[in-house]
Amino acid sequence: MFSEFLQRLSVWEGIDTWIAVTGALAAMACALPGTWLVLRRQSLLGDALSHAVLPGIVLAYLGMSWMEEIGWLADPSHISSATGIGRVAEGMSLVARRQGALFIGAALSGVVAALLSELVQRWGRVERSAALGVVFTSMFALGLLLIRLFADRAHLDPGCVLYGNLETTAFDTIGGTMIPQAVVVNAGMLLINGLLILLFFKELCLNTFDPELGAAQGLKPGWVSLGLMSLTAATVVAAFESVGAILVIAMLIVPGATARMLTDRLPTMLGLSVIVAACGAVLGHVFALTLPAMVYKYGFGLDQRVMDASSAGMMAVTTFGLFMMAVIASPRHGLGRVWLDRLRLQLRIAREDLLGGLYRREEAAVGNPSTSPQQSNAPRTNVLQWFARNSLIRQGLIQVGAAGDTLTSTGTTEARNLVRSHRLWESYMARHFDLPDDHLHATAEDVEHFLGPELQAELAAELDQPTTDPHGKTIPHGSDN
């Protein structure tokens, strides 16, 4: 299967490189503001922005098309016959003009959406999230309606608007070069985002993690939030033509969420989000070229011949796959780490319970030789207890003999500390809480595993160094006594 994967990848051409580069630059540009949205718990705001700016983008596009028809603007498809630097400069000018118009339209649309959501919240007497949901979905529907009404006039394809046109943007090059316009636009947006985050890093940190402290130092939290929203809107506009209004959400949020699973350090998180975004984009295009045909070949219920898939869509799927890998395998917050820590804790508690049980049986057998620990060799149906017992044997804490399992000298020391914690806690509960004696044991069974020597010393000092617990049993001395 791997050889077939490489064989299908061998058809990679120069245009595929530009597609992967364009997608990577768009994803990396989106990842930087998206990470701040994740940290500020405003992930859905990126979704809302991508929906709310659609009418403004469509109207700006229609306006430029109309001005090109009447001759007020030069048609990008008819760049002058100049060559060299002149032709490149003219192409760059058209790109800048086009992106500027789209950004202005998106910004105006965002302002209108903000005003409408405020009015709906005030007049409709609904919560802010409900007002945002009403306004942003309505504006998104308006954008789709405008596309449907005027698509033929402005060459707008609803599918491209929603899901991007990444495969064909690589052919839309700047005059006189082989560089696609989308590469220049998204690279410029990535550079702007990086520079602004570096310049206003302190302000963003204060506004994100402690806005009250920022306000006390003279920082205007509202202006910082507005600046971040404007930067996000500009990034959405830059990536709009490549990945559309829907898939840009994945590029905004998923890389930052993935990086958040991998680290708690902010600079590292920003760097990882960019790396995850780039890897998701490149791997997404690779999988778009290879996986559909392989899936078709091996069946899986497909009744139509499928040879490839949307690169932008596969980039979103791949980025989500990277996120799921981080959720499972993250060394700090992953489910695998959580399950492993939980298993280790359960194994430690099982080991200590076994040590404590052996100590109590040996303690009870003192002065009564007929009492023996034979029952410790009873069949063990609990897998965790089996592992705990074998672990104690390997570590030399218990030994197996004719009389059954018994504690070694080292095992006795550890077991004594555990029983000391148990009985000290029972004494503490009996002194400070009005509880029957038969209610003390269950709590101490849980707490005994988490009382170290320092807490033992504090409890003993507060209880005036007791020698017996509420049940009259002797409290053993600690290992340092």
Image: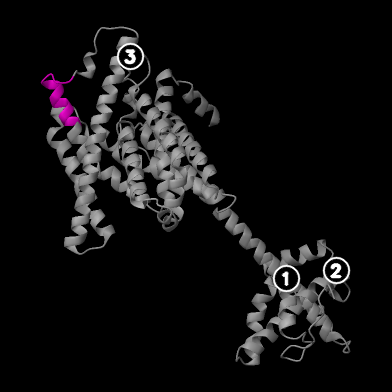
Q: Give the range drawn in magenta.
A: 61-73
- In which image quadrant can residue 133 be found? bottom left
Quadrant holding the C terminus? bottom right
The reply, left or right, for residue 467 in relation to residue 348 is right
Q: Which secondary structure dominates the residues rendered in magenta? A: helix
* Position above or below: 252 against 434: above
Q: Nearer the viewer, mark 2 or mark 3?
A: 3
Please give the label number shown on residue 410. Answer: 2
Measuring 23% from the left and 35% from the top, which residue is drawn there?
A: 104
Q: Does the magenta stretch include residue 167?
A: no
Q: Identify the element where label 1 is drawn.
A: loop
Q: What residue type is labelled 3?
A: Val
Q: What residue type is labelled 1?
A: Gly
> If you read the primary sequence from the N terminus, does the residue marked by circle 1 or circle 3 appear first?
3
> If you read the primary sequence from the N terminus, does the residue marked by circle 2 or circle 1 appear first?
2
Residue 82, percent across and down? 28, 7
Which residue is label 3 attached to? 88
The reply, left or right, for residue 131 in relation to residue 438 is left
- In which image quadrant can residue 445 be found? bottom right
